[in-house]
Image: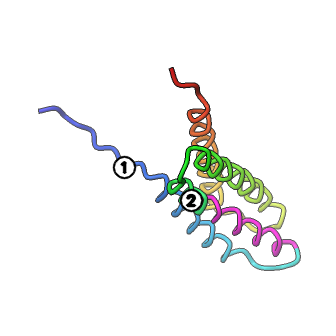
């Protein structure tokens, strides 16, 4: 018998959904004031949009639509990264969770970039 290493199933739809839930929880903890109100709304909108657009990409009826939706995922992920980076300017103590979410969104951006690259490669 081979000594198999069991790897966790990679499910990007589940991963983006979990990310959206974590963004929602983070936004709930940020005290609303003049500085944070816009930031929280934008972070919540962009952070939850990533998974919604990935779900749309999975149900695309054509390759063109799939590529478009993945490009929207990447765009929304980049915007989410932007808002996460601004959190420290609000005097909100960015917890380890905020740092983890920033790392996760950077990984998601790389994944979406890779998907787009593989879609644009010419087939031989």
Question: Which element is circle 2 on?
Answer: helix
Whether 106 is drawn above or below 99: the answer is above
Give the residue displayed 49% in from the left and 57% down from the top.
13
Residues shaded magenta? 35-51
Quadrant into which the N terminus falls: top left
Crowding near the residue tagged with mark 1, few <14, some 14–19, many ≥20 C-alpha atoms within 10 Å: few
In the picture of the structure, the residue carrying the numbered disc 1 is 9
Outermost residue, bottom side: 32
Where is residue 87 shown, x and y percent of the image? 77, 62
In which quadrant of the rendered view does residue 50 lie?
bottom right
* Mark toward the viewer: 2 or 1: 2
Give the residue displayed 60% in from the left and 55% down from the top.
100
In which quadrant of the rendered view does residue 96 lie?
bottom right
Where is residue 31 shown, x and y percent of the image? 75, 78
Q: Nearer the viewer, residue 120 or 3?
A: 120
Crowding near the residue tagged with mark 2, few <14, some 14–19, many ≥20 C-alpha atoms within 10 Å: some
Question: Which element is circle 1 on?
Answer: loop
Q: Nearer the viewer, residue 61 or 27?
A: 61
Magenta segment, principal secondary structure? helix
CA separation in Å, label 2 and label 1: 21 Å
Is 62 a magenta residue? no
The disc label shown at residue 56, or none: 2
Whether 35 is drawn above or below 76: the answer is below
Outermost residue, front side: 61
Where is residue 103 shown, x and y percent of the image? 62, 49
């Amino acid at each position: 018998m081979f000594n198999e290493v069991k790897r966790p199933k990679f499910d990007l739809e589940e991963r983006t959904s979990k990310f959206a839930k974590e963004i929602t929880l983070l936004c709930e903890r940020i005290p609303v004031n003049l500085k944070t109100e816009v930031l929280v709304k934008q972070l919540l909108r962009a952070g939850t949009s990533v998974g919604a657009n990935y779900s749309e990409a999975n149900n695309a009826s054509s390759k063109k639509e799939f590529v478009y939706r993945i490009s929207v995922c990447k765009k929304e992920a980049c915007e989410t990264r932007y808002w996460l980076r601004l959190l420290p300017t609000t005097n909100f103590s960015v917890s380890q969770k905020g740092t983890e979410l920033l790392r996760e969104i950077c990984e998601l951006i790389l994944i979406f970039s890779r998907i787009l690259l593989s879609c644009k490669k010419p087939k031989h």
